[in-house]
Image (tube, coloured by chain):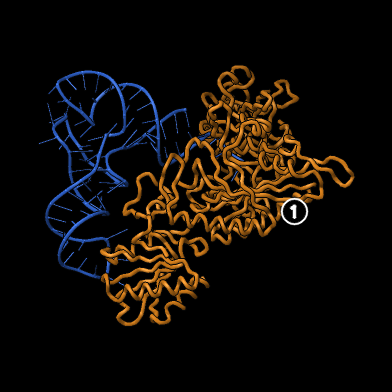
Amino acid sequence: MLRLSRLFVRTLRDDPADAEVPSHRLLVRAGYIRRAAPGGYTWLPLGWRVLRRVEEIVRREMDAIGAQEVHFPALLPRDVYEATGRWTEYGDNLFRLVDRKGADYLLGPTHEEMFTLLVKDFYSSYKDLPVSLYQIQTKYRDEARPRAGLLRGREFLMKDSYSFDIDDDGLSRSYAEHRDAYQRIFTALGLPYVVVRAMSGAMGGSMSEEFLSPVEAGEDTFVRCTACSYAANTEAVTTAGRPARDESSTPLTRIDTPDCATIDNVVGLLNREYPRTDRAWTSADTLKNVVLAVRQPDGATETLVVGVPGDREVDLKRLEAQLSPAALAPLDEAGFAAQTALVRGYIGPQILGASSATGIRYLCDPSVVAGSAWVTGANEHGVHVTGLVRGRDFTPDGEIEAVEVRSGDPCPVCGSALRIARGIEIGHVFQLGRKYADTLGLSVLDQNGRQVTVTMGSYGIGVSRAVAAIAEFAHDDLGLKWPRAVAPADVHVVIAGKPGDATTTAAESLCSDLERAGLEVILDDRTGVSPGVKFKDAELIGVPTIVIVGKSLADGTIEVRDRLTGARDNIAVAEAPAAVIGLCRGG
RNA sequence: CGGGGAGUGGCGCAGUUGGCAGCGCGCCUGCUUUGGGAGCAGGAGGCCGGGGGUUCAAGUCCCCCCUCCCCGACCA
């Protein structure tokens, strides 16, 4: 039993000034965590209980799919990460340190290398596979900007698992098992989530999905269909196919547009001097051509122009995800100086294309559909063209998803409107493939005695982050409202009488009964603290069932409150233990 | 790394033209109180983020640095 008179906790009346998001504010205020370092938090008794309960649920479901728990050191030698190039590739986010002999170490940000090498050490036959291993470990990342308390720290608790299979089918099965287990875990945690398609990015591999919890404080943006189940990371979202148009009857016309280097200026001038009869010109009629510098990992660079409708912004992250592993940046001054054919503000695709005289590759967004006519630059100062038709007057080298996705864009699956939402990544399942196995030489002999490279999956859950994510949902103005599965206790009993009166003995007796039944109990046995304070603290701490032994005891009842629904009920003292046990077990 | 805000007791904050470092909450003692963050009285608790400078005198003015929060960049 946790007696509040002795429990190591201090609740705060005011929000801490450095906390902004609800989970951070309330977890500090209710005495669950306390900041100890930039991006590092001390888990106090209440918080530690919640964390362990989350951890247990994760462990239970991992064990249920046959994954086996191991535990690596957090402190790792450099050479292992050197082998995969991550000692340098991980960059500034890697915590590096040096021991007394001058040897380099790192604090593990994730443990692909260690798991791969461990399996390599033990296994050499296809008969040993498949196998899945996991650990629940403290991970370290030297985040440029830790923020939002537990949601993004530099030290955090993570469950990471890895599957090892002989072939792609096996990997698909292991992936599906993890994916299913993750759904069970987040459901058990009472944590709303959305599974979104993610880009596998530079890591190679194919299938990758993120489990996002749709909270405002989240740092990931994703889209979700308002009608069907489609959801995707904004980087991975694809747009619905659009029908081609036939606007080839539109004449191609040169118009003088002095000092019209911006789309707004061009549209304004068109409406003044070349008004349409059917409607006004808008920025959506213009073709915006954005010049980018593409740098391949080997250092090779290329100038690339991407065309999008003028009412849209280019989403560089989305583009970069598709061009990965190349890096993207807007072309700088020096770049423009070197590309004399490009007239800033007046760029048009007429002179572009890999096979054109300029040799500059030109891609356009799929929304620039075949046969559509556009207003765009004439590649001369002060001149634009209208009626530039794709397929007649220019032909791109290809299409690429380039525009910033907006709420209302059509879903690629069903065509209904997409909606943009914010979320926090609480899990990630990922078909890693053979990247690490190749590099680190993890292969086994197959049935025919041939060496086969093992294929891997990697699967992560942010355990400490999940605690914060739950708190993001499970709270109201008064405080936390933990789901039963993770609450620091089952019942919070408040003695709301005068010290030494009958309420104390009645409460103590009730608590013993509850404990004997296996419930975890918090008892507010503080003396000299007024009932109002105790009620506030109980609501702040957020245990799902609050029992008040106070003035109603005179009528032979105690009060049972449901912190989640706010329901209140008076129950006869004699029936109280059974009733409370029923609530806690049934809830 | 860029932009903005802020560092004063455990928490939240005030501190004027430079002149004895304050308030509320919390904490300790005593008395009163006991169903919605009680009252009275008396206490404890400070490297005013750090370093340098100006000055008779610096929380306050000047310079440098550090840290925290927010936005962006970055981010399994």
Please give the name of the residue rendered at 30% of the width and 80% of the height, measured from the top-left corner.
A554
Counting from the top left corner in percent of width and height, residue A534 is at 32, 64
Residue nearest the observer in this picture, A87 or B37 = A87
Chain coloured blue in this rendering: B
Horizontal side of A565 relative to A321 (left or right) equals: left
Kindly tell me whether residue A387 is visible in this rendering.
no
Horizontal side of A446 relative to B25 (left or right) equals: right
Please give the name of the residue rendered at 43% of the width and 81% of the height, measured from the top-left corner.
A575
Secondary structure under tag 1 reads helix
Which residue, given by chain and number where applicable, does mark 1 sit on?
A: A173
Please give the name of the residue rendered at 38% of the width and 55% of the height, measured from the top-left corner.
A8
Residue type highlighted by circle 1:
Arg
Chain coloured orange in this rendering: A
Counting from the top left corner in percent of width and height, residue A515 is at 46, 70
Residue nearest the observer in this picture, A150 or A60 = A60
Quarter holding the N terminus of chain A? bottom left
Horizontal side of B50 relative to A317 (left or right) equals: left
